[in-house]
Structures are given as C-alpha cells and as structure tokens.
Amino acid sequence: MPNSRKSTILIADDQPDIRKLIRMTLECEPSYDIVEASDGATAWMQLCTHRPDVFIVDVKMPSISGLDLCRMIRSSADLEHTSVIIISAQAQSSDIEQGIKVGCDRYMTKPFSAIELFNTVDLLIDK
C-alpha cells in the first residue's frame, strides 16, 4: 500500500518571484505540502514548526544566511531527516564547496532547471 503521508517542502528565499517559481515547479505533485519563508529567522521558525522533508534555501537571506541555516539544521536532532537544497546565484567552485561543507545535500546555481529541481526533490524524498 503506497504511503499517503504528504511530504513537506520549505522554500526560503527573499525574492518573491523565486519562491513563486519554485512553488509552481513543485505544486504539480499533490503529495507535497509547500511552506514558504522570506527571511532566515522566519525560515528557522518554519523549520522547527513543520520539520520539513526538504528545505530549499538561498545563500543570501536577511537575518540568517542559508549557510547558517544549513549548519543549524545539521546540529539539530529534530531536523536530522531534513534534506537541504541550496539554490544560489553564487556559483564559484568555492561557494559550492562551502555549501557542501556545511552539509547541504545538493547545491544548485541560479538560473536553475525546474525539471532538475523537481527530480532532485523527488530523489531526496525517496531516499
């Protein structure tokens, strides 16, 4: 019998258009419950409240950066199951290495492929 539990995805980006694009990419999957945050502090509150399966975050965020949020997730037993996808315009190899170092599961650069994002989320939920 298939699992009927919805998977929660938290999208955190200070740019409303990016959040909308990511939401539109993922909401075609009815088993995803999507939550949004426009800054790091709100994202942290949403993380603690919803304990999402996947957290999609930009590096440059007001109040708490995406990298710091990733560090916080990796040090929280309550969030150990949460997969992290960083989506950032910072595309230097040193930026990507820093994302991997703080524990993200995937680092994608802007502009990103909607199909690649959807497939990545799907893979991380099934892991």
Image (tube, rainbow, N blue to C red):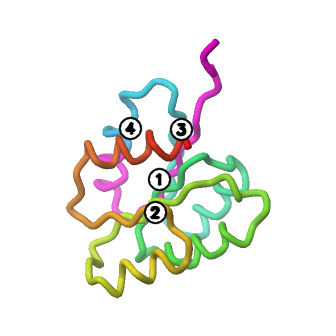
Pinpoint residue 106: horizontal percent, then vertical percent.
Answer: 42, 62
- What residue lies at 45% left-to-right and 74% top-to-bottom? 61
For the residues marked 3 and 4, what is the alpha-carbon distance in whole angstroms?
15 Å
For the residues marked 4 and 1, what is the alpha-carbon distance in whole angstroms?
10 Å
Ranked by sequence position, the earlier of labels 4 and 1 is: 1
Query: What range is drawn magenta here?
Result: 1-22
- Mark 4 residue element: helix
The residue under label 1 is which amino acid type? Answer: Ile
Ranked by sequence position, the earlier of labels 2 and 3 is: 2
Q: Mark 1 — residue?
A: 11
For the residues marked 2 and 3, what is the alpha-carbon distance in whole angstroms?
20 Å
Pinpoint residue 69: horizontal percent, then vertical percent.
Answer: 58, 72
Tell whether 76 sits left or right of 52: right
- What residue lies at 34% left-to-right and 87% top-to-bottom? 94
Q: Mark 3 — residue?
A: 126
- Mark 3 residue element: helix
| Quarter occupied by the C terminus | top right
